[in-house]
Image: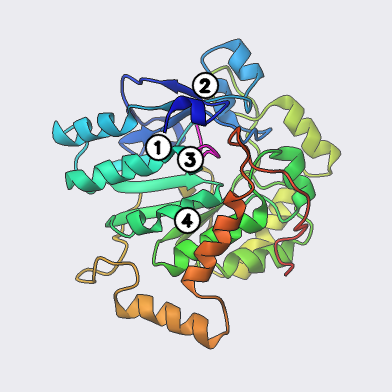
Amino acid sequence: MSPSEVAGIGFVDARTILTPASGFIRRYRYSLNPYSGCRFACEYCYARAFAPTAEKRRTWGEWASAKRNAAALITKACADGTLQSGDAIYMSSATDPYQPAEHRLRLTRSILEAILASGVQPRLTVQTRSPIVARDIDLFQQFEYIRVNISVTTDSEQVRLRYEPKAPAIKARLRAARALGDAGIPIGISISPMLPLGDVEAFANTVASLNAAEYVSQYMAPPGPIFAAGTLPATLRMAQEDGWGLAQYAAARDVIQTVLGADRPLLEGDAGFAPVSAPRLPEGGPAGGLGGPAGQHRVDERAQRGLPGIGELVAGTQDALRHVDERGEVDRRPGDDEVNRG
């Protein structure tokens, strides 16, 4: 796809696609960012601090650049031994790898394809809030060590529009999470940062029903020096205006942990962003996500409960893609006030 086909997205030739990991992802070997910048415009995003200029920090959410040579760079890294099987990768630390433009560009998908074609099997963690991620289930099923973390930060579309004005609807994220899980892909649910919640117990039951491999929550981080992760003071003031402080966060966290139960800890902070340590399927199991007894059990269980099949769930996530405009932005239509409705 030529640059002219995705308006509002810049194109750059990157020097490298793998960056030595540090900070809250220091247990990984590399971070991998297919894009620079992010069009989701989350008010609290710490990645704003890493923008290269003051102007780009000010206009965070209005721009993004695609690293058009990313697939070639990852192919080279696999060939020369820079990236080896077992290396832990966090994709991504300073962007969303499933930007709205990814629907057309397929840049992140090309990176996954290049890694698989090389025969290298890293321990891959994907972090996103986009339903576009469900498109790549067929590739995720070919990774031995993988977890896809979905950010589900609130149960309210009004709150989502206030803090994440261009990000996908909450229900679309939940559909994507279910599609991934039912396809045998381990998922993580990132309630990070936890934004104001309307019905905490209903929200807790919703995320618990996803049967994620990992759950993590976090309140908004206080602002730090430039190039340090933190939430803008203006965003913290928004939370105060909404009556959402540390006390409310702590109370909501207790409810969610109670619903999850002792066997599913609600991790906090960087403890919830550890590299994948267990293979996607039990040792000796088939490579395909639904080829074995465990996967078939999930399919049978859904049928018995009268729930939609995996194909229908994946199709449901595609509905969100039809609301991506020519600038690569998600259509911000109102609706779906609560994740547990409908």
Compared across the picture, whether 324 is left or right of 235 comes to: left
Q: Nearer the viewer, mark 3 or mark 2?
A: 3
Query: Mark 3: which secondary structure?
Result: helix
Q: Nearer the viewer, mark 2 or mark 1?
A: 1
- Which residue is depicted at the point 75% across and 51% down? 157
Residue occupied by mark 1? 107
Residue occupied by mark 3? 104
Q: Range of the magenta residues? A: 95-101
Q: Nearer the viewer, residue 242 or 77?
A: 77
* Three-letter amino acid code of the residue under disc 2: Phe
- Which residue is depicted at the point 69% across and 40% down? 164
The Cα–Cα distance between marks 4 and 2, rounded to whole angstroms, is: 28 Å
Residue 141, image x, y percentages: 33, 60
Q: Is residue 113 magenta?
A: no
Quarter placement of the N terminus: top left
Res. 12 mark: none
Query: Is mark 4 in CB contact (under 8 Å) with mark 1?
Result: no
The Cα–Cα distance between marks 4 and 3, rounded to whole angstroms, is: 14 Å
Counting residues from the start of the chain, the first of labels 3 and 2 encountered is 2
Q: Nearer the viewer, mark 4 or mark 2?
A: 4
Counting residues from the start of the chain, the first of labels 2 and 1 encountered is 2
* Three-letter amino acid code of the residue under disc 3: Arg
- Which residue is depicted at the point 59% across and 16% down? 56
